[in-house]
Amino acid sequence: MKQLFNVVICLIVSNVIASAQYKLVKPIFYAPFKVDFKERFYDKIFIQGMDDYLYVYLKEGGAQTGDTAIIFSMKKIDLRTDKIIDSLQFTPLSKNMFLKDIIPGSDYAIFVDYGQLFFTRRNNVQSFSKKGADFNAGVKLNDSLVLLYTLYNHHPADGGTGLFLNIFNVKKLRFEETVVHEFPGVILGNLSTNLVSADEHFIYAFAGLSGRVFKYDFKLNKVSESTVRFLSDKEKSKNTNYETKIDSIIRHDRAELEHYANENKNSEYVSEVYSKDFIAQKIAEIRSDFSFIEKVFKWKNEEVILSVSRPGYEMDYRDLYRYNLKTNRTYLIYKKFQTGRKKNLKIPEDYFVVDIINDKIIAPYFYKKQIYAIAYNDEKLFKSGAIDSLDLRLFNDVISRGYQLRILKYKL
């Protein structure tokens, strides 16, 4: 009887988790943007959350400045009141910058390009790079240090392979540490993943397929290793075997390329790993056949939220887990969290979704029991019915009024 009771309780809890979703509350920030087909509307607004604050960055340069520079302004929102408490405009940046991330600071901002950062404070901007310091994302560690990182498998002629970790000192304005760690499942670097987080003392990197978690200190030394529990035993065995197989293929291919390069016989070896077909095939395999950690979101000081992609979910759903960085405990909090729009719309959340699959620079910010996410249209124009009908309604509004860039607040 007791066992039956436990089963019933588990089923009830499972159903609650599966059905629970977010609720759109209100917009907290609004910035209209006139239609300009020389610029992409999703390249105009970016957000970064840190503690009780949301930093909204608006790209104001580009086509309207003669395509000579990029100008960013920032609005700082206190999430305890949803009010703007600070505003700042930065010195123009080079139009050739390919923006990948923004790291907010107390009186500065770091704009991250591939392997290059632009440190801006007041009316001053400085560019920094370092040989061997590869990165395309970052996170603030404390008042002095910023972590810059990437996970990628470069062609041997272009660089190394693995997890690239770099420490930049914002007070001394210099790189202090640069390390490349061999890392399992490096093929995930070809997907739009974000698998690194940090707390006040350590850095954590997640192997998306096997669920292994690597802990590093701020000198970038490996401290320990643990495992996230989000896979069944069968899935874990399947994922680990696949991860090991692909890593082995990559190591072999790199070794062969390096050998022939040293012997000046590049033309005698045709690389399999660095072909577009190989990468596209492996990405398709991973997305269709495997459960894997796709994103890591900072939530609380000791906890992160893990977004897990599963076979059949495509771009419509993800499972969300709470993971405690100190205790290594994992909790499923949302089964089939909606990330894609529905074809038959009933409620605003069917169209104005919380898209956690987005790149880090435009990804939603989880804050306590709220989520803050970017939208590009006026949510008040929502009408139930077929998605094509609402698409046309919003398109006509864009032609009439321009894009209605905004930050929407959701309640979990």
Image: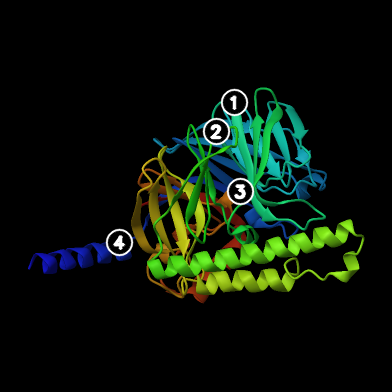
Which of marks 1 and 3 precedes in the sequence? 3
Q: Residue at x 60, y 67 (%)?
A: 245
Q: Are marks 2 and 4 in contact (CB under 8 Å)?
A: no
Q: Amino acid at mark 3?
A: Ile
Q: Assign the N terminus to one quadrant of the image.
A: bottom left
Q: Mark 2 to mark 1: distance in Å? A: 8 Å
Amino acid type at image mark 1:
Ser
Q: Earlier in the sequence, mark 4 or mark 3?
A: 4
- The answer to whether residue 106 is left or right of residue 354 is right
* Residue 3 spot, x, y in % from top left: 13, 66
- Residue drawn 58% across the image and 37% down it: 221
In the rendered image, the vertical position of residue 127 relative to residue 63, given as above or below: above
Residue for badge 3: 45
Against 387, residue 20 (above or below) is: above
Q: Residue at x 15, y 64 (%)?
A: 6
Q: Is residue 271 above or below residue 376?
A: below
| Disc ID at residue 144 | 1
Determine which residue is flagged by label 4: 17
The reply to whether the C-beta atoms of the residues labelled 4 and 3 are less than 8 Å apart is no
Which of the two discs, 2 and 3, labels the residue nearer the N terminus? 3
Element class at badge 1: loop
Secondary structure type for disc 4: helix
Disc on res. 81: none
